[in-house]
Image (cartoon, rainbow, N blue to C red):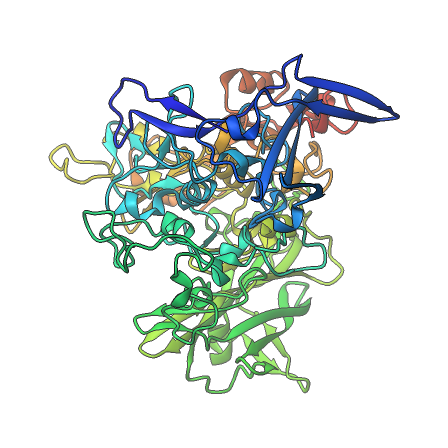
Amino acid sequence: MSRTETADTNDFPNGLSSALQATAVAGTAGALSVENKGGNAVAIKFQFPKTLSEYDNVAFDKYAVHRIGIQINTNATKGRTNAINIAYDFVPADLSTPADSARREVAKTATCLECHEKGSFRIHGGNRVDVAYCVTCHNPYTTDAQSGNSLDMTQMIHKIHMGHKLPSLVEDSKEYAIYGYNMSKHTYATFDSPEWGGVKYAGAEPAGVVYPAWPYGHGTAQPMNCAKCHRGDTVEANDTGVTAAGNNWKTNPSYRACFSCHDGESSQQKPFVAGSTTFLHGNFTEGTAGGACIGCHNATTTDVKLNITTAHATLGKTPLNPTQGYKTSAGVQRDLYSFEYRIHGVTTESNDSVPKIHFSILINRGDTTDTMDLFANNAELTGGPTFLVAYAQPDALATTPADWNQQGKRQGQPQTVALSSLVAGAAGDTLERQADGTYIATLNSAPFPAGATMKAIALQGYFQQTVGSESVRLATRSVVHFVDGITERRRVVDETKCLSCHDTIAFHGGNRVDNPQVCVICHNPALTSSGHTLPLLATDSSDRVGMFRTASDRLRAETSNNFKELIHGIHAGNLLGVRNQNNNPTPYDFNHNLFGNSGVAQIFGTDCTKCHITETYYPREGQGVLATVNNVRADTTDEDSSDSLRAAMASITNSADRMTTAYGASCATCHISSAAKTHMQQYGAQFAVRRDALNPALESCARCHGKDEYMDVRSAHRF
């Protein structure tokens, strides 16, 4: 069934005067009846006002598979409407037999919910909650009249998830937007740059979804992991996302699916002849073989440039993308090595200070997996991982800190010892091979300080493999191990939950991989962005885009890089800051991110368990969770001097530092309204106050939001 949407009189780019759209028939009182069948069962009967053959724009074929989509809304619980969607397939010529076996199902709601929070995966006012129901209306014949863009599920979802990487946007400046019934524009990418004091940061990366991607950073991530949504093979025992047609992306590709991402007119991979709608390889029509695409592009061809699987291979192997590959000018290379880092134990010697690490590295060269000989001449490999030395020390604000802080180090950053340095015997450190092929590393150059707690060693970083004339980084999962017998740092998030959505996480050029417990070593409460140390913009140098005109502008560019603020801010779309890289501004702007926005783009809403381990979302007042540094300030009055600010960063105990209490910092990155902050302040939270004025003991969030209290976190967040 369909309707004709008439476009608004406004002149939208590429808009149409009218467009055909799928529609529904409401269950009116005369057409709908409900029969109580006893217990909790009811029988619902609905009479369509017309026969199927009488609807406009429908060529009725009684032998074709038809679908009835049913939407039922029940009473609200926890502030949300309970919506039920049902999709029933049938063949009118044989109503006695359901046609489920003929259903074309390329993705399941279960895979959507691996990223989207169930309570937020409610589209069109909260009534559409199931993919099989969504595609009933979002079919190839549904178009948005205002924009002229297709609302076909295949086109729409691919383009949304491509974000600012969509070729038609990047190369041809053609925005993918949907206006909808209420003339409200929905767009999924932006090239807006952050601004301070009237200065635009032209170097800022555009923001958008760009998912599911292989991440080596916000700017280089590419959405190429098709199996994140389309899954035809079981990845693990409890995989609920497998569908019969889940492998269609590689075994039966279609022009509608592929060209929804590869849609540029000027790209080398363009589907169209420039300036026209003629397909580069001819005018295909979609058929059982996907419009003839499969003749060249399939999963079995040995031509790595045409093989769909290798073309979408990620640099590192992941559960959903086990074909590892690197794209060179010659095509995809499939002979890359992979590694596994293992720390078997950590002890200390020399007055409980010098770390002694028992570890090994496994290398897979394709056919075999062996313990790596670190002293051998591995000519095809360069680089290698690095040890991080993590610990906590008490200070005036926390006598038993529950976060790593690496006191005495610049911005609380850990001391590092490179494996290559150990192999070379530098700095007095030693590396000894054991009889079983494992190694003992003694880090004489990186002792734990006296009184340190939560002492731990991490191994992170990557080897690089020479492939032809190029060097390829091989991201490897980072690991962390505590000194034997010591109290460990608490675990707050479950990495399996991170990876359930991301499949793999590789940041900082591929150094930090798949382990948030390693991330929090560096992203501790003392770490802030470094934009406040940039030189001020000279009045006669207005062409220096990205510099600051005033000291206050510069100080506002600094923000906490503590892990909880960073992750909450990114996923809520509330994080903005600038880094100083060799006196050049490197801005990052997540204010346009769509992860936390309301409506169709929302991924995370209020369910803390989407990331958190059970009950780690409760306040831990009095248990040593550290306050956050928002701004590093010099103890002098020379706030205008970038040199004085650089000097202040060498210490994490400047009395003039601006700080926020632990739970105010946690909550205010999502709850950003002035009313929310005022409420927090009424119960002891302090925001951006001087270190010497901070009193963490005043914070009393647990009084109401603690476990089983009046507004327990679970109750307040409705999960």
> Relative to residue 72, is residue 502 depicted above or below?
below
What residue sits 44% from the left and 66% below the top? 298
What residue sits 74% from the left and 27% below the top? 706
Q: Is 233 in front, or is 502?
A: 233
In screen coordinates, is 139 left or right of 171? Answer: right
Quarter of the rendering occupied by the C terminus: top right
> Relative to residue 213, is residue 437 depicted above or below?
below
- Looking at the rendered structure, the number of numbered marks drawn on it comes to 0
In screen coordinates, is 533 left or right of 428? Answer: left
Indicate the position of residue 302 as horizontal and vertical percent values.
42, 76
> Relative to residue 334, is residue 617 depicted above or below?
above
Work out whether residue 364 can be spotted. Answer: yes
Indicate the position of residue 276 as horizontal and vertical percent values.
21, 47
Outermost residue to the left:
540
Work out whether residue 598 can be spotted. Answer: no
Q: Is 577 in front, or is 635?
A: 577
Indicate the position of residue 412 as horizontal and vertical percent values.
51, 48
What residue sits 56% from the left and 44% below the top? 64
> Relative to residue 181, is residue 188 depicted above or below?
below
Indicate the position of residue 283 as horizontal and vertical percent values.
29, 54
Outermost residue to the top:
29
In screen coordinates, is 305 left or right of 345? Answer: left
Q: Quadrant of residue 88?
A: top right
What residue sits 58% from the left and 44% below the top? 63
